Image: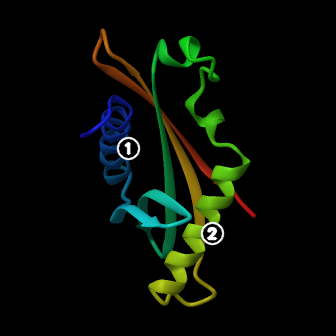
Amino acid sequence: MVTPKRKLGDIGEKIARGYLKKQGYQILEQNYQKPWGEIDIITQKNKEIVFVEVKTRTVSEGQSLGYSPYPEENVGFNKKQKVIRTAQTYLLEKKYPLETFWQIDVIAVELNIQTRKANLKHIKNAIWQ
């Protein structure tokens, strides 16, 4: 059974993928999983690999749950460490050369259910070691 939280996340990831494609990114994988973490979207633009963490909230959800109203602020230390480790694993597993340029971006999607509109913020190189 798909939870409401998962449905919301899927919507945000779909919006993020559409945005990335329009920006010239090639989608390589989505929902890449390892026991210690997951990366929502893996892309390539030019010769750079970009790992993307997508955070989605509804307009009122952040306030009612006590979260920051900005979805991107909900990527905490532990999540950052998991994403870094998972990204490094992906690069090793796919045998990318050590000199491959890569970065981790965050895309924050804020959905307004009433108006059926979304605001998207792309924060490049948001997570680093």
Question: Which residue is drawn at the image coordinates 48% and 90% (left, top)?
Answer: 95
* Lower sequence index among marks 2 and 1: 1
Badge 1 amino acid: Ala
* Residue 81, placed above or below residue 124: below
Badge 2 amino acid: Arg
Badge 1 local density, few (<14 within 10 Å), some, or many (20+)?
Answer: many
| Residue 107 at x, y percent in the picture | 50, 42
Image quadrant containing the C terminus: bottom right
Image quadrant containing the N terminus: top left
| Residue 11 at x, y percent in the picture | 31, 36
Give the labeled residue for mark 1: 16
Q: Nearer the viewer, residue 66 or 114?
A: 66
| Snapshot quadrant of residue 10 | top left
Question: Which residue is drawn at the image coordinates 35% and 38% (left, top)?
Answer: 6
| Snapshot quadrant of residue 128 | bottom right
Residue 85 has which mark? 2
- Tell me the mark number nearer the camera, choosing from 2 and 1: 2
